[in-house]
Image (spheres, rainbow, N blue to C red):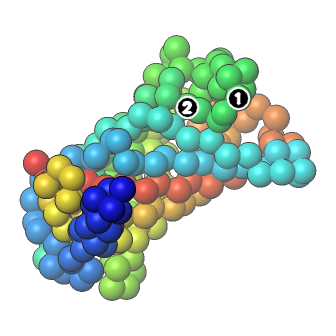
Amino acid sequence: MRILAVLMVLASATAAHAVNVTDPAQVRAGDYRLEPAHTQVLFSFGHFGFSTFYGRFNSVSGSLQLDPKQLAASQLSVSIPVDSISTGNAKLDGELRGAQFFDAAKYPTISFTARQVTVAHRSVAQVSGDLTMHGVTRPVTLVAKFNGAGINPIDKAYTVGFEVSGHVKRSDFGISQYVPMVSDDVTLIISAPFEAK
């Protein structure tokens, strides 16, 4: 039992020191891939004015080309299979995949490609790009906050992490079922670790 306790303390100490780069200017330049096992793609919307409903996408892939000395030249692309949507309600998941909403059979993928990265302040940037959803492509600007970078103590990969947020109007993408009773405005929260290739 004491051995287990010691191991837990050591693991905790290792995790606490996993992030050793807190200055975004010190992040290693290079090519990164999104680490899907620990990426969270969350969304929320108002439901009839009574509650806020939450969901997520369980699958995501992406790549990042990053040079902190030339941040504006960064390249980012992300792809999300619509079928991976999950709300905790199987009936609703089926409806959201259906023709009245995402129409996953016809439009199986949501994608985002960054076109411009602008530093807002030290650890925050605005990422503007093209969001394609439901067969429609629209410009979207997201806010990305740098969390930190360092060696992942489990898989030993150099990792850089971001917290991303933004809003989209689903009707802009042709998904207007039940607007305005179910809100048009959808909030996005994405927690994204990228591992060096």
The x and y percentages for residue 66 are 17, 62
Dot 1, how many residues are within 10 Å of its Cα: few (below 14), some (14-19), or many (20+)?
A: few
Quarter-wise, where is residue 163 in the image?
bottom left
The x and y percentages for residue 34 are 27, 47
Given the image, on which type of amino acid does mark 1 rest?
Asn
Residue at image coords 59%, 38%: 173
Residue indicated by mark 1: 89
Residue indicated by mark 2: 85
Q: Can residue 117 be seen in this view?
A: no
How far, Cα to Cα, is label 2 from label 1? 10 Å
Q: Nearer the viewer, mark 2 or mark 1?
A: 1
Residue situated furthest front in the rendering: 1
Quarter-wise, where is residue 158 in the image?
bottom left
Secondary element type, mark 2: strand
The x and y percentages for residue 121 are 37, 85
Whether residues under marks 2 and 1 lie with C-beta atoms below 8 angstroms apart, the answer is: no
Residue at image coords 47%, 35%: 58
Residue at image coords 40%, 60%: 128
Give the camera-side residue of 49 and 23.
Answer: 23
The x and y percentages for residue 49 are 88, 51
Numbered label attached to residue 54? none
How many numbered marks appear?
A: 2
Residue situated furthest top in the rendering: 105
Q: Can residue 167 be seen in this view?
A: yes
Dot 2, how many residues are within 10 Å of its Cα: few (below 14), some (14-19), or many (20+)?
A: many
